[in-house]
Amino acid sequence: MTTFNDFGLHADINRALAAKDYTVPTPIQTQAIPPLMKGRDLCGIAQTGTGKTAGFSLPSIHHLLTYPHRPTPRGCRMLVLAPTRELAAQIAQSCRDYGRFTKLSVSTVFGGVPINKQIRDLAQGVDILVATPGRLLDLIDQRALRLDDVEIFVLDEADQMMDMGFIHSLRRVAKLLPSRRQNLFFSATMPKEIAHLAEQFLEDPVTVSVTPAATTVEKISQFSTFVEQKEKQALLHSIVASEDIDRALIFTRTKHGADRVVRHLAGAGIKAMAIHGNKSQSQRTHALQAFRSGDIKLLVATDIAARGIDVSGVSHVINFEIPNVPEQYVHRIGRTARAGAEGKAISFIAPDERPYMRDIERVTRSKSEPMPLPENFNELVRNLPKPVAPPRDTGSQGRDPNRQRQEANRGRGGGKPQGERGPRRDGPAGEGAEGQRKRRFRPRNKSVGAHKSAVKRVG
Ligand code: AMP
């Protein structure tokens, strides 16, 4: 069996791994670290939760330590691009953890927070910069950042980047990078257009792939219930009351839909918070912390806001609305059943969502088990409590859902659930307005594909 000691990583990294109690590398780490240590480009097909962050950051930190020099002012030696603020913050934290016994500097830049502090942070240059594409380009436009000294470039969650409309930003970034660099490209899925994007960044890459979609899905018990859209809220209350939930992620397609679910739960005194692109950074951080710490057991999220979030102990994923892209379903339910634990996914299927569920079952080659509506469902629908605004914008402050079982089943008041229907696609939560901004498209520089004839590092 491979251990971390077999990789020949810098002693300061091994110390950090020991401090984190990592002994055995995950499959993606076993496959990715040796070629990365030799300076190869890498194309990784892997989801969050597989250990890919350590897979790319450990050999990169090793490189930065092996060839030490100060970063140039306003420059960075390693650049990691991630689609959402949460993922960027998480990656930066991992780099800090793995580099904690070194003097390497790590900075994060993303939209939704003031830019001036980020400009100051970058003035002296940093070793590792983790960024979302929109803010990265803003900083470049303000001449606060230059990319001509990047030695290692990592593009994480490329499929999500494409979904969020970052393609032109990525092409612009590619043109600003130096020709001699090492490239790492990660995506949970590899449809044709992503493979094409990968070709533009990578030179003779090693490809590694872990946990194909179908395998991930097989580990999770999947259930589905046919229910009218306007009755989904009552079904959610009933499930929260009857299931033994440690932590549940509830997915809606839209930001407003997520807020509505929180208000309805609050109406029944059930504690929940929402996380999506209309929330401020501090609200999102607060909601995630509350979910991680167990202070709230229900987190309502849009797909994009939930991407990359790594919270252990998620016992349930509830698809309040069904995604129209099958891969999105795989990402969603992959939030549960982490590290071999059992997970349960429950999908609420309105009549017009049946075709989406059929597509999902075809792509994942799995079938969910029918879960009948509860016996007293009509009564629950009739007595659904009225939605109320959570006391603070961060979410409702009601009581623990498990203590609410009786109450939720009994129901109070006679408010009608609002329809949850909204646009099928959520905006780019990760970047707020920044991600939606149209950037002027410049035709792809031919050198993007051609300028990588050499990489700095040789084995
Ligand atoms: P990632 O897919 O990089 O987000 O990692 C998922 C989780 O696994 C994170 O909480 C990591 O801290 C943890 N992790 C990564 N590699 C290892 C390892 N070799 N041993 C134990 N935990 C790990």
Image (tube, helix red, strand yellow):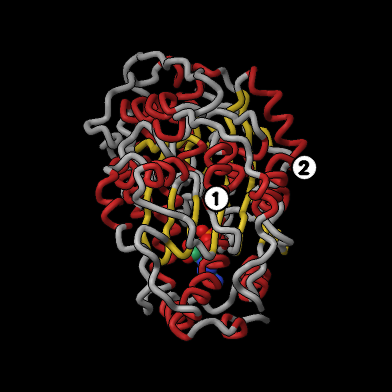
Q: Quadrant of the N terminus?
A: bottom right
Q: Which residue lies at the image location 45% right of the left edge and 51% below the top edge?
A: 87
Marks 1 and 2, Cα distance to the nearest angstrom? 19 Å
Q: How many residues crowd around disc 2 within 10 Å: few (fewer than 14), some, or many (20 or more)?
A: few
Total number of numbered labels? 2
Q: Considering depth in this image, is 411 or 73 the residue closer to the camera?
A: 73
Label 2 is placed on what type of residue?
A: Arg
Name of the residue lying farthest toward the left: 391
Label 1 is placed on what type of residue?
A: Thr
User: Which residue position holds label 2?
Assistant: 365
At which x and y percent is residue 115? Answer: 29, 44
At which x and y percent is residue 5? Answer: 57, 85
Please state if 430 lies on the left or on the right of 394 as rendered: right
Residue 412 is drawn in which quadrant?
top left
Of the two numbered discs 1 and 2 on the same chain, state the one appearing first in sequence: 1
Q: Considering depth in this image, is 266 or 174 the residue closer to the camera?
A: 174
Q: Which residue lies at the image location 67% right of the left edge and 36% below the top edge?
A: 326
Q: Look at the image and tell me whether residue 157 can be seen.
A: yes
Q: Considering depth in this image, is 284 or 338 the residue closer to the camera?
A: 284
Please state if 194 lies on the left or on the right of 107 as rendered: right
At which x and y percent is residue 431? Answer: 42, 38
Residue 385 is drawn in which quadrant?
top left
User: Which residue position holds label 1?
Assistant: 336
Q: Considering depth in this image, is 415 or 5 the residue closer to the camera?
A: 5
Q: Which residue lies at the image location 53% right of the left edge and 35% below the top edge?
A: 164
